Image (cartoon, rainbow, N blue to C red):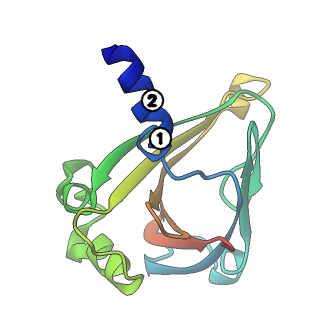
Amino acid sequence: MKKVVLVGFLFTCPSILSAQYIDTKWTVTGYFGELWFAEEEDILGKHQQFYKGWADGVFYSCDYAGQSATYNTHTIREFLVNKEFELVNQEKAFSKVFEENGLMNGNTKVFVHRITCNGSKVADRKVLYPFITVDGSNKAFYVYEGAIITFTFEK
């Protein structure tokens, strides 16, 4: 009986089973920090798109060549104090970016995605990490060079 209740609960609350989806067309809308080598005009307004095993965009591409994605879930508070992002979060960069985008509710879930592409050969292997989404938001963030890149998608 316990198993039936658990399965029933999971079907009625599917949001606890997965992260916010990433399979959509994202548009780069801004950045916070410094672009060290990239030119602003080569990034702003450009797209990053994911669909099942395919991806194409300004930062990452995978043409049905063994793409996979995993994620870790944090509250915003947990994310902001996570040592993994400490170097990136100097001067409280993520706090500022989340605040600018109205995402500072401490209990909101943050999903840190790791997207990989095996490629057809070893030289084709790629990783897009961290690709960060926030539950209930149409925003995503990616750490690139010395900046946090901001993406949005149309709801």
Which quadrant of the view contains residue 115?
top right
Q: Secondary structure at mark 2?
A: helix
Question: Residue 79 in the image: x percent, y percent?
Answer: 26, 56
Residue indicated by mark 2: 8
**Relative to residue 13, is residue 52 drawn left or right?**
right
Which quadrant of the view contains residue 106?
bottom left
Residue indicated by mark 1: 12
Amino acid on which the number 2 mark rests in the picture: Gly
Q: Which of the pair 22/94 is nearer the observer?
A: 22
Question: Residue 56 in the image: x percent, y percent?
Answer: 77, 53
Q: Residue at x 47, y 59 (%)?
A: 133
**Relative to residue 154, is residue 82 drawn left or right?**
left
Q: Residue at x 47, y 64 (%)?
A: 145
Taking 1 as reference, is 126 above or below it?
A: below
- Is the Cβ of the residue at disc 1 closer than 8 Å to that at disc 2? yes
Q: Which of the pair 98/118 is nearer the observer?
A: 98
Q: How many marks?
A: 2
**Relative to residue 11, is residue 51 drawn left or right?**
right
Question: Residue 91 in the image: x percent, y percent?
Answer: 21, 77
Q: Residues within 10 Å of mark 1 (few under 14, many from 20)?
A: few
Amino acid on which the number 1 mark rests in the picture: Thr
Numbered label attached to residue 39: none
Of all residues, the one furthest to the front in this rendering is: 1
